[in-house]
Image (spheres, helix red, strand yellow):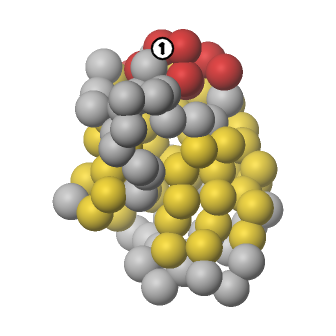
Amino acid sequence: MTSISDSTPEIVTEIYLSTELIMIPKEKIRIFALDAHTIGLSNNPPQIWIEKRLWEGEVTIFKDKEEQTIILPKEIVEFYRPKKIEIAGTIKKDNILLVVQ
C-alpha cells in the first residue's frame, strides 16, 4: 500500500494523491464510507458501493502539477477518526479504495 497521509498522532483531515500515481480528471469526486476501515472515491462507482455504503458525499479536489488534495468531509473524519490513510488499490482508474488506520 502507498501512504497518502502523514502518520502523526493527530487526526488526518486531508489526503494527498500524487498525479504520477492517480489522476482524477474532474474537480469533484464522490466519497463513500464503505465499512469500518475502507473509503471509496469515484464518480462512477461499482453498484455494490452504492448498495452497501454507510455514507456518501462529494468533495472538491485541489490540484497542482504534482499533487491532488482532498479535504475530508466532517462526517468522514468523525466516523473514522483516521490517524493514517493508505491507497489499497484502484479499480478501473476512477475507483480508488483507501484503507483507514
Give percent across and percent down for residue 66.
60, 82
Residue 30 versus residue 9 in the image, above or below: below
Image point (44%, 20%), residue name: 81
Left or right, residue 63 beside residue 39 = right
- Residue 32 on image: x %, y %: 51, 33
Q: Is residue 18 visible?
A: yes
Image coordinates for residue 76, horizontal then vertical, percent:
55, 24
Can I make out residue 44 in this image? Answer: no
Residue 47 location (% of width, % of height): 44, 40
Q: Which residue is at 48% across, 27% downward?
A: 11
Q: Is residue 12 left or right of residue 70?
A: left
Task: Tell me which corner region of the image, top left, top right, bottom left or bottom right, holds residue 30.
Answer: top right
Kindly identify which residue carries mark 1: 79
Q: Is residue 99 left or right of residue 14?
A: left
Seen at 50% across and 35% down, the residue is: 12
91, 99: nearer the viewer = 99
Q: Mark 1: which secondary structure? A: helix
- Please identify the quarter of the rendering in which residue 64 is found: bottom right
Q: Looking at the image, which residue is at 54% across and 59% down?
A: 16
Label 1 Cα neighbours within 10 Å, binned few <14 / some 14-19 / many ≥20:
few
**Residue 16 vertical position relative to residue 64 in the rendered view, above or below:** above
Q: For the view shown, which residue lies furthest in the front direction?
A: 9
Quarter of the image for the C terminus: give it.
Answer: top left
Amino acid tagged 1? Phe
**Left or right: 30 as drawn, with respect to 5:** right
Q: How many dots with numbers?
A: 1
Pick the residue in front: 53 or 65: 65
Which is nearer the eye, 25 or 50?
25
Assign the N terminus to one quadrant of the image. Answer: bottom left
